[in-house]
Image (cartoon, rainbow, N blue to C red):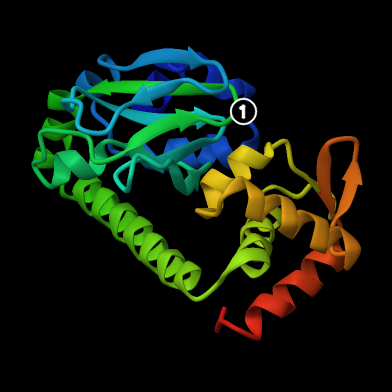
Amino acid sequence: MEQKYLYQVLPFLNELERDKREQLEEYFHTAPVWLMDSFKIEELDRGEIFVRENAPVESVYVVARGIIKATDYRVYGVAYDFMHFEGTYAMGGMEVVMDLDYYRTTLETVTPCTMITIPKQQFKKWLDTDIKALKQESKAITGYLVTEARQGRAFLFLQGVERLKMLLTQKYEAYNQNGIYETNSTRTELAEESGLCVKTINRSVKRLEEEKLIGRRGNRITISRQQYEQMKDSVSRILDI
């Protein structure tokens, strides 16, 4: 009954690809009707900030469609995009589990997104009364923190062009279509995602082009399977990844 009701409150599920639909079905597998009744569907455009660091936690956001990024502004006010999310994550769930009153990071849409917004108190009640839901959320948080820490340590050992190689290989692994990845990111966005300055990004892009490790289509960077493997091998010689 609950799964049928899930499709009633989230009718767009029928429009999703099978893998994403099954992820959401699994995530809300034990969700009671009273929780689903609290769902609100929001459509956000690319580039919209929907959570700001240090703002009071009022809602939890589950990304049903699209990609979002987490940005840190704490060091000299410089933007550093340290994680991109495309899977099924409850943004704000960590704050609820840890009893934090304020969001710990800024979240922004990278693409147009469909969000399932859940009031904080309803989400907390679900976790407090459903051990499976709490375990599921704890597992997701742990995985996210391990990935963030591992990536942060790796970036410490990489400078300039090697750091950009690592970023581009991660993007290829996540977003390639039929063996080809084409980035829509601007040089400023690549700088924010890598923690490098725009000047260093420009030099690194030029070097990768000269070494034929990336291609160009207009203003966009393209990466083939062969180019990805060459960059991955180069980074792997420095890091054990």
x 33%, y 45%: residue: 76
Quarter of the figure that contains the C terminus: bottom right
- From the viewer's perspective, tell me whether residue 227 is left or right of residue 109: right
Query: Can residue 233 be spotted in the picture?
Result: yes
Snapshot quadrant of residue 164: bottom right
Q: Position of residue 183 (x, y in %)?
A: 74, 42
x and y percentages locating residue 142 in the rendered image: 29, 60
| 24 with respect to 211 (left or right) | left
**114 to the left or right of 71:** right
Q: Residue 6, image x and y in percent?
A: 40, 23
Query: Element at badge 1?
Result: loop
Above-or-below relation of 200 to 191: below
* Res 55 quadrant in image: top left
Compared across the picture, whether 69 is left or right of 107 comes to: right
The residue carrying pointer 1 sits among few (fewer than 14), some (14 to 19) or many (20 or more) residues within 10 Å by Cα, namely: few
Q: Residue at x 48, y 72 (%)?
A: 154
Residue at figure coordinates x 42%, y 65% from the top left? 152
Residue topped by disc 1: 16
Residue 127 picture quarter? top left
User: Relative to residue 225, is residue 94 depicted above or below?
Assistant: above
Task: Judge whether residue 1 can be spotted in this image.
Answer: no
- Numbered circles on residues, count: 1
Q: Disc 1 residue type?
A: Leu
Above or below, comparing residue 11 to residue 202 in the picture: above
Spot occupied by residue 72 in the image (x, y as percentages of width and height): 36, 43
Which quadrant, please, contains the N terminus? top left
Which one is nearer the viewer's eye here, 164 or 63? 164
